[in-house]
Image (cartoon, rainbow, N blue to C red):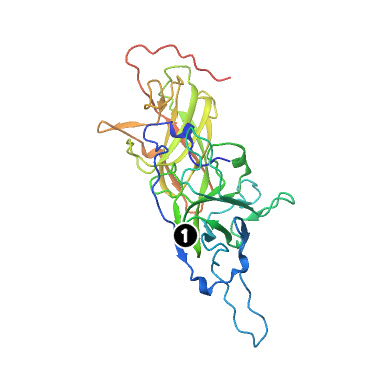
Amino acid sequence: MRLACFAVLVSLLPWVAGCGEPEDLTGPSTPVDAATDSPSADVVGDAEVDGGLDADPGADAPDVVAPACAPPTEAATAAVCLRFDPEQLDLISGDEAYDGKGVLVVQVYDTPVPEPEGGPEVPALVEVVVPDQTGGEATMGVYDPWEPVRFEALPATVYVRALFVDNFAAFSGNDLTAGVWLGGYEFPTGLLTGGLQAVALTVGEGTEVVVPMTALRSMRVTLTKSMFVQPKGNGEGPAGFLLVDTPQVAVNSAVWGIGQTPCATIHSASGIALEGVFVGDGDFYGLGYLDDYGTGMETGITAGTMVNLTIVGGQPALPDAARIAVPPGAYRVEAKLELTGTVPFQGVPPQDTVSCP
């Protein structure tokens, strides 16, 4: 499964962030004094669930404190104990893709970009799937009390990627898929991010690290057209939406959600249904488009494209009707966007050769 950088989605518009060089960010970590740890959970070059020690229930027995993270077996390496903090959402009972029941995949790399654009995938140093899948398709709940996952025989700097996969469709493609909690990435300026964050470990010691996990939420957008606007071509072609946090559209606008379909018709009575993914909550604005001539948007919104943009003070802007309010715990959101204009051609529009089967 490849979930690092998605060139197809990144190329939609010039203001969507690409796969640039990532920042070297250290996650929250706490080195542990090796003298106070128990080595009972040591596993070299692999992972296990570190449950710690329970206090003896006897009345005269002293309390026993569970070790935070034991030192590695090999003194010249480092160990890490990973705890996970998934974002809280309102799960959807009865929907297998969004009911919060899935599997946890944890991978540790020695590079922030394990899937470089145009290059081969870098194998993980170590990885584990929880629950173990050797006996069948076992699942667990995203808000169950997870035990920490331990790795050792690691270098001093590693890059951790964690995915809790609720929606198993994420395993079947390269695109961003809703119904997945992502750990190891930050989203300070939008959904499409660079590489994994660096995690600093201490050689000869165990380090406990808390991994926040951001949910990729589901958004269904229906595109329609205003009765006062007609397509320049036949009204068929690639369509999609971008979710931004301000009505003013600029080159550096942060993109918080995205969805697309390779071909659709704006003449459908029910509109164009788009399935997408987004992160966060609050007020967003949806930019909808139909690339009528199928010329692509790598260099900008091309002539003949139907959009819901207006011009305010000479600059493109989204109308208030494009505002999408997302409650804090919303796992799935539905919205409608009306395409109200078409980017004009200089001169007579060419023949439209793009059509949908």
Per the image, label 1 sits on a secondary structure element best described as loop
Q: Position of residue 23 (x, y in %)?
A: 38, 48
Q: Position of residue 291 (x, y in %)?
A: 45, 24
Q: Is residue 105 visible?
A: no
Q: Vertical placement of 68 versus 310: above or below? A: below
Residue holding disc 1: 201
**Which quadrant, please, contains the C terminus?**
top right
Q: Is residue 255 visible?
A: yes
Residue 183 relative to residue 167: left or right: left
Residue 187 relative to residue 88: left or right: left
Q: Which quadrant of the figure has residue 228?
A: top left
**Foreground of the two, 199 or 43:** 43
**Which quadrant, please, contains the N terminus?**
top right
Instruction: Tell me the amino acid under the disc marked 1.
Output: Leu
Residue at (47, 59) in percent of width and height: 201
Residue at (46, 21) in percent of width and height: 294
Q: Position of residue 265 (x, y in %)?
A: 52, 23
Which residue is farthest bottom?
Answer: 60
Which residue is farthest right?
Answer: 135
